[in-house]
Image (cartoon, grey):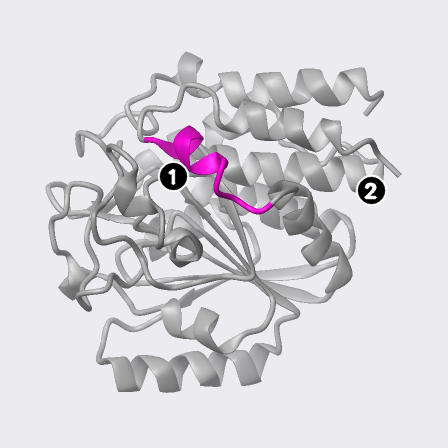
């Protein structure tokens, strides 16, 4: 049984260089949140559906945060015997398919709540997932809209994937701004934290992972799975960067500026690499 302090160290790594207030939110999170998230996946093996894709209004393209972390989680899950499929919408399918390999990418329609609920139910019946994961996927706000971190409404460009999470008992949400699926778990405290939205996401998940960058939250989840399985399931620093470059090549943009460049959340490649580098070093100390 690994010492619980190792999971706290992983949490420290994925919350470093925080610019939005995720560290302030940490004290309100349930104890052992990262370890519990990894354990949820280990306790429910099978097929996992992974939702991602965040639309950037000014570029009319998806951002670079989300898909790389989604693929890292998927690769780790497959390595320990699971199957996966990705769920996104038409604005992110091209980027997602670029790095998804042979795994299915499901195009969730952008439509009404009723039709979205029906499509979500159909997906859950068809795929019978053992668990759901959302990473950097906009979630429904209390006013019934989908908004970015700056409060701009982009509901007409965002599929209502929340309905899947409303219906499934085992889920993980990963976010870095308060407006992503899963942040409904912290809805009661997010408005009180500086730089976080006054009206956060209302969609809840069984477990919640917060990070300075959502991709980093995904990598942290993989590191926790690595500790629990005794296998290093993390992608290399080089692989993480390749995923970013690959999706930029087909339209993805840096989320803060909307520019077509190989940055993630205002971080140049070298700065973005600090998370995977630190996680790999931590696993090396654990002889993984």
Q: Which residue is mark 1?
A: 176
Magenta highlight on residue 188? no
The x, y position of residue 146, in whole percent, is 21, 59
Magenta highlight on residue 23? yes
The magenta stretch spans which residues? 21-30
Q: Quick one: which residue is furthest to the right in this view?
A: 1
Question: Residue at position x 43%, y 21% from top?
Answer: 272
Closer to the camera in the image, 87 or 198: 198
The x, y position of residue 68, in whole percent, is 47, 39
Looking at the image, residue 283 sits to the left or right of residue 132; the answer is: right
Of mark 2 and mark 1, the one earlier in the sequence is 1
Residue 212: in sight, yes or no? no
Question: Residue at position x 41%, y 14% from top?
Answer: 271
**Mark 1 residue element:** loop
The quadrant of the picture occupied by the C terminus is top right
Does 99 sit above or below residue 134? Answer: above
Q: Which residue is mark 2?
A: 229
Does 249 sit above or below residue 269? Answer: below
Looking at the image, residue 121 sits to the left or right of residue 42; the answer is: left
Looking at the image, residue 31 sits to the left or right of residue 43; the answer is: left
Question: Residue at position x 77%, y 17% from top?
Answer: 284
Label 2 or label 1, whichever lies nearer to me, is 1
């Amino acid at each position: 049984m690994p010492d619980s302090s190792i999971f706290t160290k992983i949490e420290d790594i994925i919350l470093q260089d925080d610019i939005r207030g995720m560290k302030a939110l940490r004290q309100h999170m349930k104890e052992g949140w990262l370890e519990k998230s990894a354990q949820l996946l280990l306790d429910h093996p099978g097929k996992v559906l992974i939702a991602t894709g965040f639309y950037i209004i000014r570029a009319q393209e998806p951002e670079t945060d989300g898909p790389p972390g989604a693929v890292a989680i998927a690769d780790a899950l497959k390595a320990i015997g699971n199957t996966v499929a990705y769920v996104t919408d038409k604005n992110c399918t091209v980027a997602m398919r670029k790095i998804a390999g042979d795994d299915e990418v499901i195009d969730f329609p952008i439509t009404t709540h009723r039709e979205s609920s029906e499509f979500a139910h159909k997906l859950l019946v068809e795929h019978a997932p053992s668990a759901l994961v959302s990473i950097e996927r906009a979630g429904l706000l209390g006013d019934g809209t989908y908004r970015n971190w700056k409060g701009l409404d982009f509901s007409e460009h965002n599929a209502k994937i929340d309905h899947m999470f409303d219906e499934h008992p085992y889920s993980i949400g990963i976010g870095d701004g308060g407006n992503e699926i899963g942040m409904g778990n912290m809805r009661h405290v997010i408005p009180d934290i500086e730089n976080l939205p006054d009206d956060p996401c209302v969609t809840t998940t069984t477990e919640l992972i917060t990070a300075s960058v959502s991709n980093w939250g995904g990598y942290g989840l993989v590191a926790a799975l690595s500790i629990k399985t005794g296998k290093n399931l993390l992608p290399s620093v080089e692989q993480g960067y390749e995923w970013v470059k690959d999706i930029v090549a087909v339209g993805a943009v840096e989320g803060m500026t909307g520019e077509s460049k190989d940055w993630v959340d205002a971080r140049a490649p070298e700065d973005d690499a600090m998370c995977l580098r630190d996680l790999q070093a931590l696993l090396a100390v654990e002889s993984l």
